[in-house]
Image (spheres, rainbow, N blue to C red):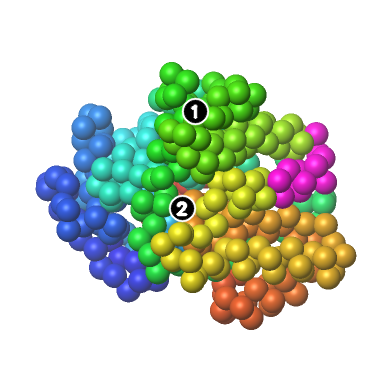
Amino acid sequence: FISTNLNQHIRVDINDLVIKSEEAGQTSSLIRGVAFKFVELGYKIGGFNCIVESEVAIGSGLSSSASIEILVGEIFNYLFNNNTIGPIELAKIGQFAENDFFGKPCGLMDQLAIAYGGIIGIDFLDFKNPKVINIHADLTPFNYSFVIVNTGGSHADLTDDYASIPKEMNEIAHYFKQQSLRFIDRDILIKNINPLREIYGDRAILRAIHFIKENQRAESIIKLLNEGDFNGFLQTVNEAGNSSFKWLQNAYSINDEKHQGISLATELTKNFFKVNNTIGATKIHGGGFAGTILSIIQNKLVKEYIAEMENVFGEKSATRVSIRNSGINFVKEI
């Protein structure tokens, strides 16, 4: 497994599929973890040589780990299993590899998005069998572009920061004897706010409120996109960004307050909208605490916006991206 970007040559023995603590956080652990899960589930694996070139920045909230997981899973799927494994199963295998072998807690959303491609909605009511909704929305006529701004990584280990979010949300849910905040509305939460504050503290409550409203926003965005209401879409994205910043509180790590690239990029972007008298949207992208923001910019202003971001965060820190209709696939068999 050769990475041209990192100039790395990775060799994994598929006859040795036990967890190796020294591999935690490394690409080799993802490959080994995916191979292990394939075998455990009764699928076939085999050896392969692979050269990888990628534009996905590592550790920036752009799902670089999930990209590798789904890539390796699809290689095993295509070469040794007659392409019979569906995207949901591939996503679950990738999640397992990241959680158990790579050593990082994660959900299933990134893996599903990469496996499916396009614009999708995901309902996790049944977490073992999530419902995926394809959204057939053409955003081209609105003359806007998506720009990813990589503000740089944190100088702190963010694992505990990431883990604190589901931990605190689950604590609130369990108080109401529920497995998820999905089954709790804001009114019930507020009625119990005093004992919740006493037991779990204010941040957990704020994060729970964010979760409840974010679910509502996700449903609204699906409706807005299907109806072609782009202004409503922009407004809802901004509301999501504002809620992440204030209530979810994942703009920066409290263990590394000196570095607040996401906060700085957000302020600069909002000021860019104001100075240019334009409507746009911006929000934290990925898990937060460091890494990237997503901005939605009028096409005529993209070049100027990218130049302004790169002046602060460095060359190639801002990238114009598009949404492809397909997920991972083989474009040519050699």
Of circles 1 and 2, the one toward us is 1
Q: Main secondary structure of the magenta part?
A: helix
Residue furthest left in the image:
16
Residue furthest right in the image:
277
In the picture provided, is 287 more to the left or to the right than 98? right
Is the residue 116 above or below the residue 146 in the image? Answer: above
Q: What's the CA distance linking mark 1 and mark 2?
A: 37 Å
Residue 230: x %, y % from top left: 80, 45
Q: Quadrant of the C terminus?
A: bottom left
Task: Between residue 236 and residue 68, name the one nearer to us.
Answer: 236
Residue 219: x %, y % from top left: 67, 31
In the picture provided, is 210 more to the left or to the right than 107? right
* Residue 87, image quadrant: top left
Circle 1 is placed at which residue position?
195
Q: Residue at x 68, y 36 (%)?
A: 217
Residue 265: x %, y % from top left: 63, 67
Type of amino acid under label 2:
Ser
Mark 2 closeness class: few <14, some 14–19, many ≥20 residues within 10 Å: many
Mark 1 or mark 2: name the one nearer the start of the chain.
2
In the picture provided, is 202 more to the left or to the right than 280? left
Q: Residue at x 64, y 54 (%)?
A: 283
Number of numbered discs overlaid on the protein picture:
2
* Residue 320, image quadrant: bottom right
- Give the residues in magenta: 227-239
Type of amino acid under label 1:
Pro
Q: Is residue 271 visible?
A: yes
